[in-house]
Structures are given as C-alpha cells and as structure tokens.
Amino acid sequence: MLIDTHCHLDSEYFPEGADETIARARSEGVTGFVCIGVGSPAQARCALDLAARRADVWATVGVHPHDAAQFDDAQEAELLGLAQQPRVVAIGEIGLDFHYDHSPRERQEEVFRRFIQIARQLKKPVVIHTRSAPEETLRILSEEKAADVGGLIHCFSENKAFAERALDLGFDLSFSGIVTFKRAVDIQEVAAWAPADRILVETDSPYLAPVPLRGKRCEPAHVVHTARFVAGLRGVSLEQIAEQTTQNATRRLGVSAVLN
Ligand SMILES: [Zn+2]
Ligand SMILES: [Zn+2]
C-alpha cells in the first residue's frame, strides 16, 4: 500500500481520464492520491471535483511559481473559496523556481508569501516547490512562520544541509523519481539518512518518471519504483517503506490508504 503524495492528473496529461490512470495505479498497490490543483482556478476546481467524488483522492489548491505572473485578485478570491473545502488537504504547490524563471522573481516571492499566509489562516499544511532558490525559499518559510502549519518539500532535489534546515522548520521530505537517477547522489544521500518518520514518496506525474521508466510519461503507478529504490537505499523492505510513508502521509496530510 502506497500513497502518491503529489500527482497532477489533469486531462491534458491523461486524456484517457483520471479514473483509468488511478485504476492502473491501484492494481500496483497505490491506494491514495494527492492531486495537485495548480495551473489555473479551473484546474484547481478539476482536482477538487475528482477528490469530491473519489474516496481515495485528495486535492491541494495553490499557485505554482511558474504561474505567479498571471495571478490576480479575482484568482485569489476563487482559490480561497476552493481552499476551504474539506477535501483540500494542503495549500500548494507554492514556492520559488529560479531555474526556469517563468514569472519575475519578485512576483514569485509575493505570491509565495501570500499563500503561506492563507495556509496559516486556514490551518492547512503547505506543499513547497523549490528550484535553484534554496536560500530564498528557507528565508521566506522562516519569515512567514510557515512552521506554524508545516508541510512538505515536494520533489526533494536539494542537499543534506538544506534537508536539515527544512526538517527543523517542520517540513517533511517527499522523494520523486529524481532520486532514482544515476547522478542524483546528494538526493540519494538524503533519502538514505532522513528520519524515517519524515519521508514521503510521490510521482509528480506526468513528469520525472523513475528509472527504469525514465523519459516516459510518469503516472501514479510508478511511485512503486521510487519507493523500492528508497527502500534499497535505507536497507529496508518495500513493505516497510510503504507502511512508514503511508503513516507519515496520514500524519502530515490526513490522507490514508483506501482499500476499495
Ligand atoms: Zn513542483
Ligand atoms: Zn507538481
């Protein structure tokens, strides 16, 4: 039993429909799905609709740093309404992406800060996206008192020094298919070392399929490969990693394995 704590199931990525994608994952033993509602308010609504009609899906609502430039007051009002729904278990993904710089950096920071405030107001954890902005991300998390709600660093791709500081701030570490890549030595070091009660696994589908499927469209069924790899790094069984990360997801996000 595994939970994919971060997947994008939008129809543009999975034209066959989310139910079919989920059925394939369920047949591999993946029994819970956190569907990320970013891109636009319409996409957030889709994630929430899916979560509302399926017991094994939960949603998040937020503004990806890539989309910060388009974010405006009308979007905020709509997203705030959605974020209050009980099936929305976290705010995100939010954060900084200074690698692609799809939105101006100052605007990314403003929107990031705004959504940490919203999360604190709603008392929901935050899902953090951070790329090429480690110091800025940690500084904002600290200045905005994100530790009040905690959350997770999704698609963890930093080093051990960053991991230690993120853990201190109340953030768990979620590993995606990237950890299986040959050159991801720093990430593997963190996945082997991190406290057992602070790790999660995810796909970030449709991107970043784990080895041996690297380069293919990634889907929630593939989280099994990532979990098996992390188990190998830690010298435990796949079953142990599945049980531990499922417990962690329950504690962090209030989601659980849904058997049928
Ligand atoms: Zn992300
Ligand atoms: Zn994502």
Image (cartoon, rainbow, N blue to C red):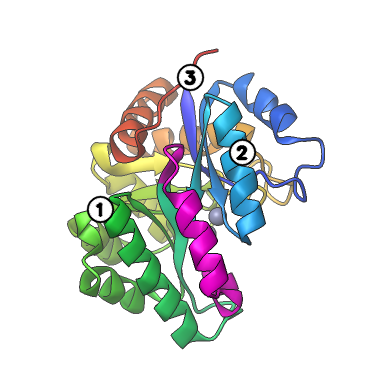
Q: Is residue 29 left or right of residue 145?
A: right
CA separation in Å, label 1 and label 3 = 25 Å
Query: Is tag 3's residue or tag 2's residue first in the polypeptide sequence?
Result: 2
Magenta residue check for 158: no
Query: Is tag 1's residue or tag 3's residue first in the polypeptide sequence?
Result: 1
Q: Position of residue 66 (x, y in %)?
A: 58, 72
Q: Is residue 135 above or below residue 211?
A: below
Q: Is mark 3 within 8 Å of ligand 2?
A: no
CA separation in Å, label 3 and label 2 = 18 Å
Label 3 neighbour load within 10 Å: few <14, some 14-19, many 20+: some
Q: Position of residue 1 (x, y in %)?
A: 47, 21
Q: What residue does disc 2 label?
A: 49
Secondary structure found at label 1? loop
- Please give the label number shown on residue 149: 1
Toward the viewer: 157 or 247?
247
- Residue occupying the point 39% across, 64% down: 158
Q: Is residue 154 visible?
A: no
CA separation in Å, label 1 and label 2 = 25 Å
Magenta residue check for 85: yes
Secondary structure found at label 2? helix
Task: Find the magenta span and give its range.
Answer: 65-89
- Residue occupying the point 75% across, 48% down: 13
Query: Is tag 1's residue or tag 2's residue first in the polypeptide sequence?
Result: 2
Secondary structure found at label 3? loop
Q: Is residue 99 visible?
A: yes
User: What's under tag 2, amino acid-wise?
Assistant: Asp
- Please give the label number shown on residue 258: 3
- Residue occupying the point 58% across, 80% down: 69
